[in-house]
Image (cartoon, rainbow, N blue to C red):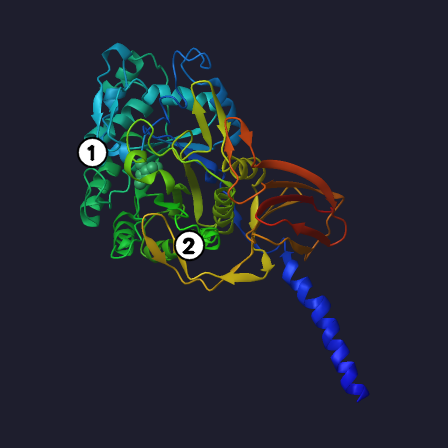
Amino acid sequence: MFKKTLLQVTLIIVLFFYVPFNLYSQNARIKIDLDRTIAEVSPLIYGNFVEHLGRCVYGGIYEPGNKLSDKSGFRRDVMGAVKELKPSIIRYPGGNFVSNYNWLDGVGPKSERIPRLELAWSTLESNLFGTNEFMEYAKAIGTEPYFSVNMGTGTIEEARRWVEYCNVKEGPYYAELRKKHGVAEPHNIKYWSLGNEMDGTWQMGHMSAEDYTKKAREAAKLMVRTSPGIKLIAAGSSNYRPGADPDHWNQTILTELKDVIDYIAIHMYVGNPDTNYYNFVSTPLVLEQRTKMIKGLITQAMQTAARGDRDPIYIAWDEYNVWYRARRGTFATGKNALEERYNLEDALVIAGFLNAFIRNADVVKMANMAQLVNVIAPIFTNETGMFKQTIFYPLQLFANNVSGTALDVFVDSKGYSTPRFNLGLSETTAQLGKVPYLDVSATYKDGEVTLCVVNRNKDQAITTDILSQNGTFSGTAKVFEVNGPDIKSGNDFNKEEVKTVEKAPVNASGNKITYSFPPHSFTMIKAKMAK
Ligand code: AHR
């Protein structure tokens, strides 16, 4: 009788305290081991992209005549924000645009430049901004240029001539033409991609994998002979829609171009059209899945490659972002094309993508957020000003803080099940099982660990023990958080609901930091290790 009562009382206590505690709060563990390294983080993962599309160039980075612009026509306010993002590399001039672009139209005296019908995004291209204007901009912001050649309507000789114009000091016709255009020294552009998304039927000059490899190999031969030492990026397939065969394309180009190229380019855009928050914030795991699949294909191709002492082929995620609202109808083409406005959940997805790049630092050596201004971009302008979109903040935090050695962290966090991921245009099935609420990456540099944590949980904070496996933390750790009142909160010209806030530093002595990650947040913790 007494035993029975004791049992009942115990049960009541458990139900009373334990169940509500678990409903309203959660615990997790993150273990950091400085010996468990992945690879050095490539600085080129903080790249960006400028395409002749909508108001990215004209009305974005370049607006001659505007009071906010400098004497070269560059928007000073925009340039200030761009510099805060510290883009390590900028891809130019497309995208789909490049597949109908003749670079010669964009050089020489502006009065002689010919406007052309632009068929990718249905506009009139004035050509008032071209190679030398872009290079002036790249120098002003201190970024590495990355050019894409036209493998659609363009010829391999056209591509070769562009390399000569940019990289050969003097002598041949196109090098001398650059000098005649007032640019005495060569631009020395190191990174060149062999076209853009050539697997897609939407691409001008679209072709089969076999035809692409044939043309790309010959273009590469001419380009490298013109400027030895350039790095070449092949256009991979990112088309995982039902019925597509991206593996065939990627395997073919990796097999056929394995001795020629340095990177394979992959793209990914995700969205939340059916308002399913938990599916949406899981999409960085799909990017990670694809990274691993491509890595497998690279490993296979490397078995029979003859690359001498060159690095293996790496992955360039040279277009990634959230893009689904401004994707169809009047938002898809023309002057105001692709003017996506972002909210907090989008920023969490971007933080997740960046975490995935760090976790795969051994193979992801370049990434470019698409794009820089106005067009699916972190910076948005009108004629009188600009504002920073939500996705600006995680990118800025990573680019300014996350470098050094990527660490393979252990994460023990509760999770949720989400059977499918909606990637914008079509639904893609990706069975991932349980998705952890905490998405984590860590790096180590100069005696400091930088931890990047997305708490995907929409409603609950997660109290987490961050445990060092070798070495103790020292002093206090700095904490930065990107968050907002609601997952749908966003920014505008006169409103900033989502931004980075520096929080109170936390105690970081001994081998444990305990921190409570708020719901729907991205947090960066920077902790020094004792010597
Ligand atoms: O970034 C927008 C477009 O998306 C690019 O032009 C193209 O490469 C991709 O499909």
Q: Which residue is mark 1?
A: 156
Q: Residue at x 59, y 38 (%)?
A: 401
Residue toward you, 198 or 393: 393
The answer for how far apart the CA atoms under marks 2 and 1 are is: 35 Å
Q: Amino acid at mark 2?
A: Val
Residue 96 percent coordinates (x, y): 28, 36
Crowding at mark 2 (Cα within 10 Å: few <14, some 14-19, many 20+): many
Residue toward you, 199 or 372: 372
Q: Is mark 2 within 8 Å of ligand 1?
A: no
Q: Is residue 501 left or right of residue 278?
A: right
Q: Is residue 100 left or right of residue 95?
A: left
* Residue 26 seen in the figure: no
Crowding at mark 1 (Cα within 10 Å: few <14, some 14-19, many 20+): many
Q: Which residue is mark 2?
A: 286
* Image quarter of residue 413: bottom right
Q: Amino acid at mark 1?
A: Ile
Q: Residue at x 39, y 19 (%)?
A: 62
Residue 30 percent coordinates (x, y): 63, 57
